[in-house]
Amino acid sequence: MLGEYPIVGRRAAEIAASVERAVGAGELPPGQLLPPLRELAQRLSVNPNTVAAAYRVLRERGVIETAGRRGSRVRSRPSSTPREWIGVDATGARDLSSGNPDPALLPPLGAPLAAAAARAAERPTLYGAPDVVPEVAELARAALDADGVPTGPVAVTSGALDAIERVLAAHLRPGDAVAVEDPGWGSLLDLIPALGLRAVPVGVDDDGPLPERVEQALIQGARALVVTDRAQNPTGAVVSATRARELRTVLAAHPSVLLIEDDHGHGIVDLPLRPLAGGTDHWALVRSTAKAYGPDLRLAVLTGDPVTLDRVRGRQRLGPGWVSHLLQDTVGGLWRTGAVDAAAVAASYDTRRAALVRALRVRGIAAHGRSGMNVWVPVPDETGAVARLLASGWAVAPGARFRVASPPGIRLTVSPLASDEIETVAAAVAAAAGATVSGRLD
C-alpha cells in the first residue's frame, strides 16, 4: 500500500511527523491511501487511539483527508506541497507564469529607505513603541475613507496573506468552512487547509463571486467568505456596483459570517473599489503594497471591525510584535510623496492586458481579464496547453495552481510583455489551446 516508505513513530506527534516528511519529500504522493487505524497501530505496536490522534493532527494541518469507510489519504494538494510547485521549468522560455509586477513600474526605493534609516537613527524604535507608525495609519485611513470603506482601526502586517491568516485565526477553528473564489488565489487555497479549515469553492465571473454560489456556500455552513475586490487572481475580475449590491444583500442575511476583502489591486487598478463591508458583524479589508511598490516590502495595511482588529493586533504582539518601522516609514514616504502614479501604472497594465484579450478573442479563444496584470484562458486540456506553449517558447501558469472545482485553464501575466509581442503570444496560445467551447469560469 505504501510502497517502500514505512510510517514510523511511537507517539502521535512522531507518527504525524513521519507522514508529513514523506509527503513533503514526495515519497507519499497525493491521493496515496494510508493504512487503516488498527492496521497501522498493530504494525507500530501502539494503541489505535495514538494513530487516530496522529491522523487528526494531519487532517488539521491539511496534509490528509478522511472519507469515512473509504479511509484516509494524502490530499490532492497537501499543505506541505504549495501550489507554487505546480508549475513549469521556464528555462529557455519567456516566463509569463510568475504573477510578478513589471519592475519598470516599481518606484526606486533607495531614497525612501535612506530617509527611513535617517529617521531611525534620530528616533530608534524600541520595545513599547506603537505597532503602527502614526503617519502610516493616518494615510492608510484617509485612502480607505476616500474609497468608502467603513470606519475601523488600522493594523499593519507582513503582506496580504499574513493579514488574512491572522483574521481567519482570530475567528475560526479547525474544521470550519471558508467560502473562496474558484478559480482563486493559489496561496490562499494552500493556507486554508494548512490552518485546518475547509475550502468551499464559489464560482466567479468577470464581475466577481456569483451571488447564488455565495448564498449556497453560506447556507451550507461556511463561516467566512474571502472576496478579491479588484484585479482578482487569476481572472482579473472586478466586483461591479451591481454585483456589490447583490453580495451585500446575501451577506445581510448572514450577519455572523466573517467577511475578508482582498484589495491587493490598490495602486495598479483604475476601476473603483466597491467595498462589501458593513453588513456583517465581523469583517476585514486588506491592502498590500506588493503589486504597486514591490513584493519585497512585505507590508499590508488592514482595517476591520474593532473586535477583529483587536484580536489580530493582540496576537501579533505576542509573536513578531510589529512590522518593522523602517518598512512602515518607507511606505509612508512613498505614499506621502506620490512615488507611484497609479493612473499611469493602471494604464500600462490595462493596455497590455486588453490587447491580449482582444487578440485571443479574435482567434476564437475566450479570455478573461478586466483588471490587473493577469489574463485567464479556459482550455479543454490544461496540461497539453502548458506543454505546447512551453515548446513554442512561452511559459504560462497551469490552472491547477488556482482551481478547486472549476474547469481547467491557464494564466498569463502580461507584465513581461511588450506591445509588439501580444500578437505572437496570442497566436501561440491559439495554436496550443484551440478555440474553447465555452468561456465560462465556473
Image: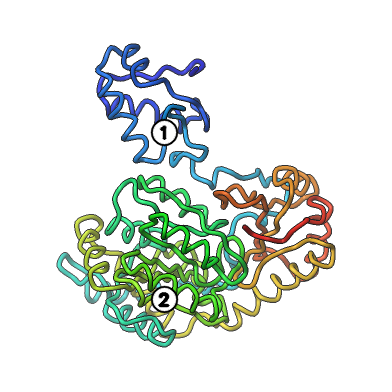
Which residue lies most toward the left here? Answer: 128
Would you say 92 lies left or right of 283 here?
A: right
- Occupied quadrant, residue 35: top left
Q: Residue 1, position in %: x, y?
A: 50, 17
Disc 1 residue crowd, few under 14, some 14–19, many 20+, Cα 10 Å? some
Query: What amino acid type should be assigned to the residue bearing mark 1?
Result: Thr
Tell me: residue 20, above or below residue 342.
above
Would you say 372 lies left or right of 140 here?
A: right
Picture residue at 39% right of the left edge, 68% below the top? 300
Q: Which residue is mark 2?
A: 112
Q: Which residue is mark 1?
A: 66
Picture residue at 27% right of the left edge, 76% below the top? 153
Disc 1 from disc 2: Cα separation: 51 Å
State which mark lies toward you, 1 or 2: 1
Q: Residue 279, position in %: x, y?
A: 36, 75
Would you say 198 lies left or right of 430 here?
A: left
Between 15 and 215, the residue placed more toward the observer is 215
- Occupied quadrant, residue 68: top left
Picture residue at 66% right of the left edge, 75% below the top? 350
Query: What amino acid type should be assigned to the residue bearing mark 2?
Result: Pro
Between 286 and 326, the residue placed more toward the observer is 286
Quadrant for the C terminus, please. Answer: bottom right
* Colour pattern of the rendering: rainbow
Mark 1 and mark 2 lie on one chain; the one further toward the N terminus is 1
Disc 2 residue crowd, few under 14, some 14–19, many 20+, Cα 10 Å? many
Picture residue at 56% right of the left edge, 62% below the top? 233
Q: Residue 278, position in %: x, y?
A: 35, 77
Judged from the image, the secondary structure of the residue bearing numbered disc 1 is strand
Tell me: residue 149, above or below residue 88.
below
Mark linked to residue 125: none
Between 24 and 30, the residue placed more toward the observer is 30
- Occupied quadrant, residue 251: bottom left
